[in-house]
Image (cartoon, rainbow, N blue to C red):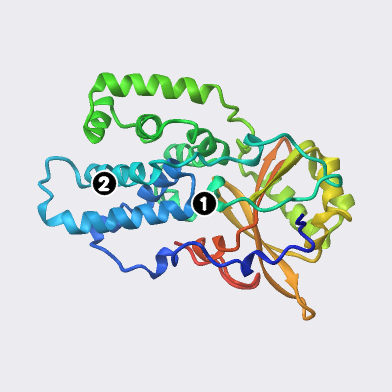
Amino acid sequence: MTDLATAPHPAARPAPHPAPPGSAPAFDPRLEEHRRELTAYSYRMLGSAFEAEDAVQETMIRAWRGLAKFDGRSSLRSWMYRIATNVCLDMLKGRKRRALPMDLSAAGEPVAEALGEPLDSTVWVEPIADSRVLPGTADPAETAVARESIRLAFVAALQYLPPRQRAVLILREVLAWSAAETAELLDTTVASVNSALQRARATMSSRDLTDDRPDPMNEENRALLERYVAAFERFDMEALVGLIAEDAVQVMPPFALWMRGRDHIIAWMDGGPGSGCAGSRLLPFEANGQLAFAAYRPSGPGGLHEPFSIQVLHVEDDRIVGFSHFLDTNLFPLFGLPQHPDGEIRRA
């Protein structure tokens, strides 16, 4: 069995993904201006930050190769969405859906159960940095819709839809495409699009999409999270008790174990497997439309802090009600996060 105190550092695992997009060649500026929104679209389709980057890179290559033959009958943006959709549908063939731990098993106990063995990265819905997917200059209403549609619960719910239904729902409900535009992109009929949308809505309505809908990031919530950082870095359990909701939930992909309840979460950290995180440093950024932290754990006799996890927190009613700890250090370079907590975040 594995626990956080004795597990090999995640950074020691070989990186399963290619180099981050910052190292990729630039394409025609007309194509590049759509990269961010296509990354957001691909992330919703695939549930993986890494696969979204791969899908967009493949989209850029196909578009670059076909640009000379682009006849202009549709907009360049629509044409690129058609390419991206085909790439995503190809990638989803034969794949199992990605999930969050609570989709796979019942909540566990902090002491009676060890973490177990990590599951393959393809099992999990992964987080994504806001800087890679949210529009930079959009109006507040558009930004709010974009934030809602990259929440972890929403993206996990999308994975329950068959791929073409998923595309229809995203195009129609998130991107506000018309039924006719969506039908043209998917080479189908308006009636077929409307039928797929109806079925997709029914599936989505059966899922609980409220568990990570964040409160607005106002001054009170920012102050709460500042207190959380101070308490976590001191590993002050008494202070943390005052910040965590009684029915809070904690998940830790790539491990299937998850916990519900403040007492269980505190027991996990205070002398349990989570005690190995004592002395960690947190660097704030934003992921999945919420405030997140890059966690750096001390390693070695010199106390050097190294990447350990991405924490995505959900704040509601002046308490922290959700902790999503993603123990995959390969996310750090993809998100532009530094290798040490005193470094600067590289914005996409």
Q: Quadrant of the N terminus?
A: bottom right
Q: Position of residue 141 (x, y in %)?
A: 44, 37
Residue 341 horizontal side relative to residue 91, left or right: right
Q: Position of residue 340 (x, y in %)?
A: 64, 72
Residue at the image point whose x is 37% and y is 46% from the top = 91
Residue tagged by mark 2? Answer: 83
Q: Position of residue 240 (x, y in %)?
A: 83, 49
Which quarter of the picture shows residue 163?
Answer: top left
Residue 317 horizontal side relative to residue 103, left or right: right
Task: Identify the amino acid type marked 2.
Answer: Ile
Residue at the image point whose x is 79% and y is 50% from the top = 114
Residue at the image point whose x is 74% and y is 62% from the top = 7
Q: Is residue 318 above or below residue 36?
A: above
Q: Between tags 2 and 1, which lies in front?
A: 2
Residue at the image point whose x is 41% and y is 41% from the top = 94
Q: Is residue 221 above or below residue 210?
A: below
Mark 2 surroundings: few (<14), some (14-19) or many (≥20) residues within 10 A: many
Mark 1 surroundings: few (<14), some (14-19) or many (≥20) residues within 10 A: many
Find residue 128 and name its label.
1
